[in-house]
Image (cartoon, helix red, strand yellow):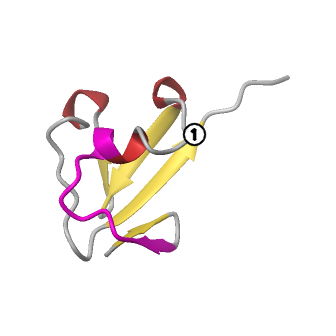
Amino acid sequence: MVKINGTELDVAGKTVSEYLATTSFCSKRIAVECNGEIVFKSQYDVTILKDGDCLEIVSFVGGG
């Protein structure tokens, strides 16, 4: 199980890209942190989620 934004999900073994493809997040407007470390967009395809990982995903919202 991987904790993503506080929710336990069974996504261990998937890459960050594979997980994001199943969500409504716009990959151009988010930041991903895994176990306290920023995951660069260039690493989404090779960063494999493991049991016990903690992922935080934040969306950027424009406005004024």
Q: Of the residues shown, which amino acid type is indicated by label 1?
A: Ser
Bin the neighbour count of mark 1 within 10 Å (Cα to Cα): few under 14, some 14-19, many 20 and up: few
Residue visible at 18% across and 46% down? 47
State whether residue 36 is above or below residue 28: below
Callout 1 secondary element: loop
- Quarter of the image where the N terminus is located: bottom left
Residues in magenta?
7-18
Where is residue 53? Give x, y as percent.
Answer: 28, 69
Closer to the camera in the image, 34 or 8: 8
Where is residue 48? Give x, y as percent.
Answer: 17, 52
Q: Which residue is mark 1?
A: 24
Residue visible at 19% across and 66% down? 50
State whether residue 9 is above or below residue 49: below
Q: Is residue 52 left or right of residue 22?
A: left
- Quarter of the image where the C terminus is located: top right
Residue 52, picture quadrant: bottom left
Closer to the camera in the image, 18 or 32: 18
